[in-house]
Amino acid sequence: MNFDETELGKVEISDPVIRDLAVHSYMEFNGLSFTDQKAKKEAKAAVDIEVEELESGKKQIKINVSTKVKYGESIPEYARNLQKKLKEDVENLSGLEVSEVYVKVLDVVEVTETKPTEVTEPEEEDEEEGK
């Protein structure tokens, strides 16, 4: 993807880099850990981009996201907020125009909150030993 050439030269951003920006934004929006390889793989599968060249020579980005929504969350609100975040992040970081963010909700998932096992007991024992 080319920018206008300046007196310093030309800057080019490849399509995979634009996609990676969108994937990173998607992961950030959903609170996914960047160190979790499974989450990263799922995010990469969920996000795709299309590059469209206009008659003017400018290029526009279309972002397609296939995602899951947590049960109880407003789907329209989730989708609008996701669209806004992806559009803003990709445009701000790349300087390119995002013409469309298409969100397809594939599933509603039940989120079960797992409470961490109580670790307070061993910590208390350690504190007593230190006295």
Image: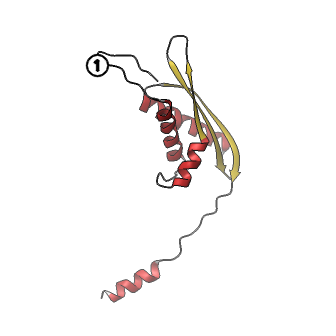
Looking at the picture, how far across and down is residue 62, in whole percent?
58, 28
Question: Which quadrant would residue 84 be assigned to in this image?
Answer: top right
**Residue 80 appears in the figure:** yes
**Mark 1 Cα within 10 Å, few/some/many (few <14, many 20+)?**
few
Looking at the picture, how far across and down is residue 86, in whole percent?
52, 36
Q: How is the image coloured?
A: secondary structure
Residue 42's place in the image compared with 22, above or below, is below
* The C terminus lies in quadrant: bottom left
Q: Residue at x 41, y 83 (%)?
A: 124
In-image side of 43 versus 124 (left or right)? right
Q: Nearer the viewer, residue 25 or 128?
A: 25
Looking at the picture, how far across and down is residue 52, in whole percent?
57, 21
Name the residue that disc number 1 marks.
8
Q: Nearer the viewer, residue 52 or 111?
A: 52
Looking at the rendered structure, the kind of residue marked 1 is Leu
**Residue 73 appears in the figure:** no
Q: Residue at x 31, y 86 (%)?
A: 130
The residue furthest top is 56
Looking at the picture, how far across and down is residue 16, in whole percent?
50, 34
In-image side of 32 versus 109 (left or right)? left
Q: Residue at x 41, y 20 (%)?
A: 3
Q: Residue at x 68, y 57 (%)?
A: 110
